[in-house]
Amino acid sequence: MILTLSIVTGFKNEVRDKVIGYGAHVQIMKSGGSSIIDSDALVLDSAMLHEIKTIKYVAKVFPVGYKPGIFQSDPDSVFYTLKEGRDTFEIQQEIKGVLFKGVDATYDLSFFNENLIAGRLPDFGSDKQNEILISKRVAEQLRFELDEEVGAFFVQNKPIKRNFRVVGIFETGLEDFDKDIVIADLRSVQINSGWGIQASIRLADTLFQDRLLFEAEAIGGNGQYKYDWGRGFGVSSKIAIAPLHDTTIRVIVSDYFYSPYEEEEEATIADTAYIHIRIEGDILSGPVAMEDDRIKRTFLDEEGFRFSIRVGTGEYLFEQEDGKGSSKFYISGYEVLADNWEDLEKLDEEVKSDLFLMSMEKGTAVEIRTIKEIYRDIFAWLSFLDINFVIIVIMMIVISVITMGAALLVLILEKTAAIGLLKAVGAGNWLIRKVFLYQAGYLIIRGMLWGNGIGVALALMQQYFQIIPLDPEVYYLNAVPIEFNVFHLLLLNVGTIVVCVFALIIPSYFITKITPVKALKFS
């Protein structure tokens, strides 16, 4: 019973805590998606974030972003010999789909710190947005090493590749999560998810009626863009000018929803880009320098953001300033931690009641789901463990009662003469029964001391040395978990003693059937 109790309690709590470590107690997302992973992006609202923090039972709340990606390992040459004796080789390269979870500097990384086996935690508050934390399973499968720069592909309008640096490796033993989750900077996930709009201005390669032609480019949003060159939004993405003095061109790019029954409505937060133009020399003394019918450019930096073109005896100096993008205003949702697991249902009710009206006022419906609802199968499976525990304890107690009842009956039969003698000298039935009950209780306590010693010893051996492993793909853990609770242990012992002793009152009733005459006659 001790082993059953400690294993069941440890199993439930460890699996539960690890699932919560990956996904918090409550997740808040935009309505319409099946999960926070595939729901539409939610606008990061400081007022909503503050409101959530003030809700009763809320311990912590974090904005998070999720984005699927694909890791690609470095090519690896495998050499071998064919049956004909020829040496040959082949190039092997592993690819693996993973789920990037983006967090910011406020996120509580204590769960991953406890399960860190190599390296360090990423510094999400610094300018290094490419630091990531991966699991041991991912590292082994792709042959990634600590401090290695690795490539990942993301799908937006077109596949893009980003490089990350592995700064830490963790292992939780929760195989279903370890094989997929990568902890990354929220800013990186926001950019790679294509949320929001990113605007830029480019100088065209040809002139338009002897004027410079500039074109606005945008990525993200729904693709239905509008452009503001300084005179309000319109559909034109181009502007032609012939600058005669230093100037700055600015464009604001937004997208919109269009309905024949309603006015156009902005769909995504807009972004702004600039291109700065500085004039040196006499630009009126001749035409723009061309080469192969294209404007001849002289690049002034490696990125190509600064360049110049000759115009007569003078030149235009250009400096492009792309928009920072509005992706930083979007997240997948919020993850909320409760003060205690027992407060989960109360927290769910409080969050739903507080955020329902607030979200409706803002025009963005949100959905709140508890960890039990998100991982329904896991928690349903854990609830079955309680039934198993109850069945095992009942069976053990029944066996104990039967065993002790049989032992008491044998003891009574052996002491029949003594019982008759005691009755002959005036001892009552209840007094004699108590003698046997005390003796049975002594045997129960003695057996329980041995049981406690053996049970606790075996449990401690498993807790510290993990002598019984598990298949993590089946049981979510790599070893049988153990958790001691002194109150539960005490309650188990006291309950067992009380049940067994009271159950022995019935067998002791046979003492009342023994008469002094018969007992002494056959002694």
Image (cartoon, rainbow, N blue to C red):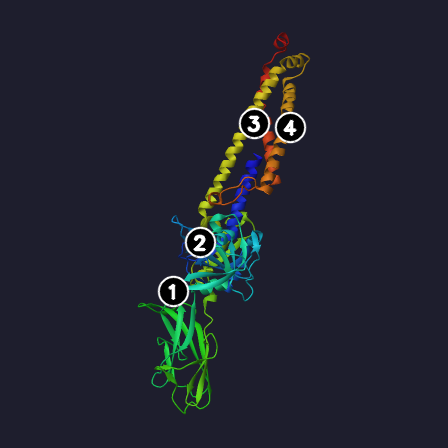
Q: Is residue 467 left or right of residue 373?
A: right
Spatial CA span between label 3 and label 2:
62 Å
Spatial CA span between label 3 and label 1:
69 Å
Spatial CA span between label 4 and label 1:
73 Å
- Say the numbered circle drawn on residue 78: 2
Kindly indicate the quadrant of the structure image that contains residue 409.
top right
Q: Residue 241, image x and y in percent?
A: 39, 84
Q: Which residue is mark 3?
A: 400
Spatial CA span between label 2 and label 1:
32 Å
Asked which secondary structure carries label 3, the reply is helix
Kindly indicate the quadrant of the structure image that contains residue 193.
bottom left
- Say the numbered circle drawn on residue 158: 1
Label 2 vs 4, first from the N-terminus: 2
Q: Which residue is mark 4?
A: 446
Label 3 vs 1, first from the N-terminus: 1
Mark count: 4
**In this rendering, the label closer to the viewer, 3 or 2:** 2
Q: Residue 428, image x and y in percent?
A: 65, 17
How packed mark 2 is, by other alpha carbons closer than 10 Å (few <14, some 14-19, many 20 or more), is: few
- For badge 3, the amino acid type reads Ser
Q: Quadrant of the C terminus?
A: top right
- For badge 2, the amino acid type reads Val
Q: Are marks 4 and 3 in contact (CB under 8 Å)?
A: no
Label 2 vs 1, first from the N-terminus: 2
**In this rendering, the label closer to the viewer, 3 or 1:** 1
Q: Residue at x 56, y 65 (%)?
A: 126
Label 3 vs 2, first from the N-terminus: 2
- For badge 1, the amino acid type reads Lys
